[in-house]
Amino acid sequence: MSAARIVVMGTGYVGLTTGACLASLGHQVTCVDVDHAKVARLSAGRVDILEPGLAELVGRGLTAGRLSFVVGGRDAVRDAQGVFLCVPTPMGAGGAADLRAVEAVTNEIGDVLPAGCALITKSTVPVGTARRIRDLLGRDDIPVVSNPEFLREGTAVADFLGPDRIVVGSDDAAAAEWVAELYRDLAAPSVVTDAASAELVKYAANCFLAMKLSYVNSIAELCERLGADIEAVTEGMGHDRRIGRSFLKPGPGWGGSCLPKDTHALVRIAESVRFDFGLLTAAIDENVAQRDRIVAKIAGAVGGALEGARIGLLGLAFKAGTNDLRDSPALSVASVLAALGAELTAYDPAVGGEIPGMTVVDDPYQVTKGADAVVVLTEWDEFRRLDWTYVSELMEGDAVVDTRNLLDPHPVLDAGLSWQGVGRPRPRARVSA
Ligand code: UDX
């Protein structure tokens, strides 16, 4: 395909990644945002989002003249061949997706889109949104196409340029094929279908991942009660290609800006067509239960009473490799601990500033000073390399609760501390020779 003229509405981690990556594929891309200061920073090549490779791609696009940033979409779309909607679709009241930004942008640019220009939803939107946008547009010369993103935070660029698949859906088959062609150089499998199916793929995939995690967290709890080892169990499961080896790590629960939002949205979508999606509701409930099990584990580690207990938290982001606190399980655990009277000190390499209910410090050892227990909540690699003998000298108590099974227990035990993971047997301290 020759270079297409593309406009991307929204420069968040999906919009900026989409724009910069499409420019790197040779397309002519204009990214639009409402925030003047943000557009000025991006035009100067300053990327505030923590995504490996993104700043370089933005810089290359700017230098090559294939990427630009402007405020306001009306002028930008006048000669566009495709316009991507990458605006936020947060969880609204009752869990349904909030489409106000999608509708606002559609109204802003709808009358100036050139005939034949594809309007493409990249943000996760409920099934039927393409039809709603078409009705909103009131034009039959603008094909509406669903092209959901499958980007993970922390690996968004790699995921965009090395996708497992491209999914495109539209009731205008030629427009769907045109959008699929934008990605031709990625040589990834393409699923070209109708709009509703493409919209549903995104929810079905994300909610399956959430269910898989709730399932493995439940199996981890079973392991603890049966004296089994979750790492052996998931190793044994994962060799089955139908299960796969990824997304089988137990933790404090799943979070982030997507899985919680998408699981609640799909339950509402199902309700809207009178389907009680009990399996998915159970996975959501199980995620809360996992958090409560982690809190109980921590309470047990400090002798049963959290009131006045001094607890050091290692990690706040919803997963390692990102500074995103949105729906972070670490914050969810911390909020319950604080509500039960624990005194919290927390450190995360990517997170700073004030967080209510805790003292945030900028050094992991400060978290352990005087602590009755230390809890690993985010799987940052640097926590594996802490000097546990030094930690043992700093701590008041001796309990290390590792909710990610991140650490090698032996250095922790050798330092005279106790270690407990999730779904792991309690290792015994090595008898010194
Ligand atoms: C997710 C989907 O993976 C991605 O395809 C979609 O486009 C956006 O939502 P993301 O929100 O970045 O991506 O996070 P992800 O990497 O999926 O992790 C989600 C949560 O599950 C995190 O809290 C993470 O810590 C947790 N997780 C993940 C586990 O607890 N165990 C695992 O094995 C994997």
Image (spheres, helix red, strand yellow):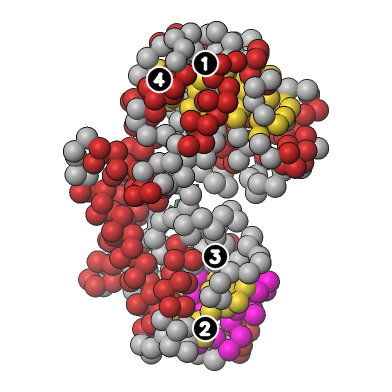
Write down the residue under mark 2: 343
Callout 4–callout 2 Cβ contact below 8 Å = no
Indicate the amino acid at tag 2.
Glu
Relative to 46, 254 lies left or right: left
Residue at (56%, 55%) from the top-left corner? 324
Residue 157: percent from the left, percent from the top?
60, 37
Q: Is residue 374 magenta?
A: yes
Residue 29 point in image, percent of width and height = 67, 23
Q: Which label's residue is closer to the chain start, 4 or 2?
A: 4
Is ligand 1 closer than 8 angstroms to the Cβ of mark 3?
Answer: no
For the residues labelled 3 and 1, the Cα–Cα distance comes to 40 Å
Question: In what element is the residue under mark 1?
Answer: strand
Marks 4 and 3, Cα distance to the nearest angstrom? 43 Å
Select label 3 or label 1 by which is in front: 1
- Boundaries of the magenta span: 361-376
Disc sitting over residue 316 in the figure: 3
Q: What residue does disc 1 label?
A: 118
Does residue 22 appear in the picture of this structure?
A: no
Q: In front of the other: label 3 or label 2?
A: 2
Mark 4 or mark 3, earlier in chain: 4
User: In front: 416, or 288?
Assistant: 288
> Distance of mark 1 from mark 2, alpha carbons?
54 Å
Question: Where 386 falls versus 51 (above or below)?
Answer: below
What's the mark number on residue 135? 4
